[in-house]
Image (cartoon, rainbow, N blue to C red):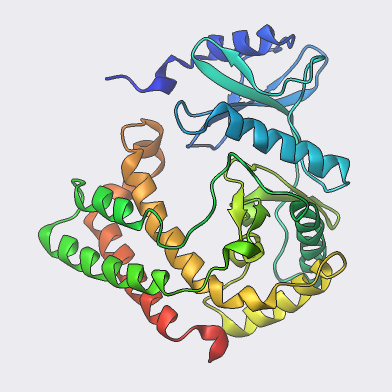
Amino acid sequence: MSHPFSALSPDTVMSAAESIGFWPAGEPFALNSYENRVLMFRDDEARRWVIKFYRPGRWSDAAIQEEHDFLQELEQAGVPVVPPWRNEEGQSLHHYQAFRFALFAQYAGQAPELDNPAHLFALGEVLGRLHKVSHQKAFEHRASLKLADGIADAEQRVVQSQWLNKFQRRAYEAVIQKLQRQLVSSSLDTASLIRCHGDCHLGNVLGRDEQFTLVDFDDCLMAPAIQDIWMLLPTDEPNGWRAQLSEISEGYEESLAFPHEQMTLIEPLRAYRLIRHSAWLVSRWDDPAFPRAFPWMAESGYWDQHIRQLEQQSLQLEQPMWLA
């Protein structure tokens, strides 16, 4: 059975761009993206564009549109983001054959340096400005983050996959069940959820001269504000973690009070992401891009390491490092 993206040839990409009035000057260049397909091209006026084809069946049209509208709202508020291009009718989500796609102006930059206090302050400032807008209303069509939600499904996907031997399967089930109990007991106040980027790691923050722009809001959702902060912190280095957080929080507080009360959610959120990430890889293995990009997932050593990492994370939940 062919994968839905197998029909996305270079000619199809170019035809999709042409269908909304853009004329690529040469074949598109594929960028690193696995959940969706993202390519860059230059048009006949030498402008650089990123064209993003959404994975069929993942998001509803309403959820994608809500992402686009959030980006436009942020841009209008002066938050540095890259909103999708809209046609004269104001449409940002387009259709070509079986695909849904959007077009973005290419933004080039470098990730912030986490040992540079000025970069950390600027990063915190951008996140504070983002969350100030986020508080103004809620998503209606995007997901809400719920700790322990989907863990049973993730466990089932991994256990039923071909990768684990019987000893790994037994160890994996034991640690996942323990983590699930720990996550259920973690306090996540639904009243504190705001519109968040959702996947705010260094690869999605691009900068020039201490000015940073947030990109790729594909995973935006309702979540605690700390969701957009914790992935930027080296949680395995407590001393560096505290120093970096101090700079980020100073920048953040240019716009909002920093959510210190949410710090206890960092390790639960990290555990949640670790579990969901491995299940995501398993669930996408029929997509040819995944075996090429993650060949080590088929190795027994990866699953041994992953189980040890989950066990260590469970210990962190018992005694969070920031309370040590």
The residue that appears at 83% across and 68% down in the rendered structure is: 251
In this picture, is 311 found above or below 14? below
The residue that appears at 38% across and 46% down in the rendered structure is: 280
Q: Position of residue 95 (x, y in %)?
A: 59, 15
In this picture, is 122 found above or below 107? below
Question: In the image, is 192 to the left or to the right of 76?
Answer: left
Quadrant location of residue 26? top right
The residue that appears at 48% across and 29% down in the rendered structure is: 55
Q: Position of residue 195 (x, y in %)?
A: 67, 51
Question: In the image, is 130 to the left or to the right of 262?
Answer: right
Outermost residue on the front side: it is 191
The residue that appears at 63% across and 59% down in the rendered structure is: 193
Tell me how many marks there are: 0
Question: In the image, is 20 to the left or to the right of 291?
Answer: right
Quadrant location of residue 250? bottom right
Outermost residue on the bottom side: it is 324
Outermost residue on the left side: it is 166
In this picture, is 139 found above or below 83? below
Q: Position of residue 268 (x, y in %)?
A: 47, 70
Pick the quarter of the image with the N terminus: top left
Relative depth, front residue between 160 and 38: 160
In this picture, is 170 found above or below 6? below
Q: Position of residue 244 (x, y in %)?
A: 70, 75
